[in-house]
Image (cartoon, rainbow, N blue to C red):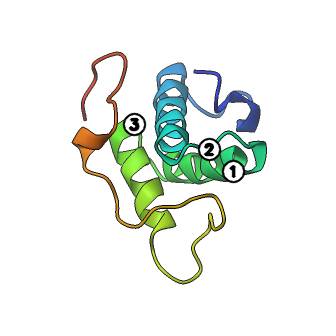
Amino acid sequence: MGVILPFLSAGVFEPNDIEAMSLACEEVCHYLHINGDTARETIATRVIELAQRGERCPTVLRDRVLAGMNAGPGRWLTGFGVVSGTPANDDLRLSTSGRLC
């Protein structure tokens, strides 16, 4: 759960929301084989933006972040091994709590 914590302001999200965002962030980083802090911060920022708009499902957060990265010209995460296409839900591990959205 700690992946996203450095990028959050205190008291903005409920603990369950933070868990969902952290899971999404971890899955995107895992899928893209990202270890660098700059790339992690970029991914976390995008996950937080989506959560601020009301999305709380880790699977949807993950898929929207990956889809946004593959949107064509002006991709927000260039140079970090971004792959083309968005993976199917079966391609990534699901919530460790077994929660599906």
Q: Earlier in the sequence, mark 2 or mark 1?
A: 2
Residue under the point 47% across and 22% down: 16
1, 13: nearer the viewer: 1
Mark number displayed over residue 34: 2
Residue at numbered disc 1? 39
Q: Earlier in the sequence, mark 3 or mark 1?
A: 1
Kind of residue at disc 1: Ala
Residue at numbered disc 3? 58
The image quadrant that residue 90 belongs to is top left
Q: Position of residue 56 (x, y in %)?
A: 41, 38
Q: CA distance from mark 2 to mark 3?
A: 18 Å
44, 53: nearer the viewer: 44
Q: Can residue 57 be spotted in the picture?
A: no
Residue under the point 57% across and 73% down: 75
Q: Horizontally, is 35 left or right of 101 in the view?
A: right
64, 79: nearer the viewer: 79
Q: Can residue 18 be spotted in the picture?
A: yes
Residue under the point 47% across and 65% down: 68
Q: Horizontally, is 95 left or right of 54 in the view?
A: left
SS at mark 2 in the image: loop
Q: Is residue 72 above or below residue 46?
A: below
